[in-house]
Image (cartoon, helix red, strand yellow):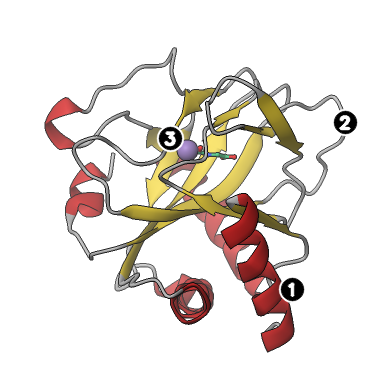
Amino acid sequence: MHSDALWESWADLLADQGYVVIDQFLPAPILADLLAFFKAKQDELTPARVGALGERQQLSDVRSDLTFWLDKPRDTALASVFSWIEESLQRWNRLLFLSLSGYEFHLAYYPTGGHYAKHLDQFRSRNNRMISCVLYLNPHWKEGDGGELQLYDATGEVETLRIAPYMNRMVFFRSDVVWHAVRPAKAPRKSLTGWLLYQPSDVGAVLGA
Ligand code: OGA
Ligand code: MN
């Protein structure tokens, strides 16, 4: 889909800065499949939870998105999206010498006023999330709509890059060290969000809430 040289340059950025932002990531037909699927599932999204398994809680002051966990065997309409996810995983394995071997993804919808407080994506009790992936699905996003992905420096104290959630913009970042937040959305905000995992786990399925 994208050239070897492009993947290499993205891998360098991911390794050096801890994140990489890629515009026009998905080919148009695959993006169309994903948007159609999102529309079809819009009514099945449920409030997201925070924390893994036993410690999971629903805390709307921490995050206020609604999610729908994907399942490859069930969600056959997304076959092309899963193959793109698998290609990414293989590229990072090869270029960054990782041992990623699974993934978990959900659709996410932030209603107006929604946000996600500053956090890391690795849970204390479950640290196999290696690379976070967010693909934005907002055709009409404009300055003032909020919902940007806010990145922080290594201390988690200083704001660095603020990334607008433009349609078909993909962000990959390290799940273990990159502090981030979703700024309050002033308009509904959609994404496909997921994690490339060090070891496959069925926890994602259990988490599916
Ligand atoms: C998350 C998250 C960022 C975004 O779901 O863990 O940080 O931009 N999402 O949606
Ligand atoms: Mn996160």
* Label 1: how many Cα within 10 Å (few below 14, some 14–19, many 20+): few
Residue 96 point in image, percent of width and height: 49, 72
* Label 2: how many Cα within 10 Å (few below 14, some 14–19, many 20+): few
Q: Mark 3 points at which residue?
A: 120
Of the image marks 2 and 1, the number of the one nearer the N terminus = 1
For this orientation, the residue located farthest to the left is 54
Q: Name the residue under label 2.
A: 143
Q: Mark 1 points at which residue?
A: 28
User: Disc 3 to disc 2, how far (Cα)?
Assistant: 26 Å
Q: In this view, does 105 lie above or below 140?
A: below
| Label 3 with label 2: CB-CB less than 8 Å | no
User: Disc 3 to disc 1, how far (Cα)?
Assistant: 31 Å
Secondary element under disc 1, as helix, strand or loop, is: helix
* Label 3: how many Cα within 10 Å (few below 14, some 14–19, many 20+): some
Disc 3: residue Cβ within 8 A of ligand 2's nearest atom:
yes
* In-image side of 71 versus 96 (left or right): left
Identify the amino acid type marked 1.
Answer: Ala
Q: Which residue is drawn at 39% across and 55% down?
A: 130
For this orientation, the residue located farthest to the top is 61
Residue 23 point in image, percent of width and height: 77, 61
Q: Quadrant of the N terminus?
A: bottom right
Of the image marks 3 and 1, the number of the one nearer the N terminus = 1
| Label 2 with label 1: CB-CB less than 8 Å | no
Residue 97 point in image, percent of width and height: 43, 75
Q: Nearer the viewer, mark 2 or mark 1?
A: 2
Name the image quarter holding residue 186: top right
Of the image marks 3 and 2, the number of the one nearer the N terminus = 3
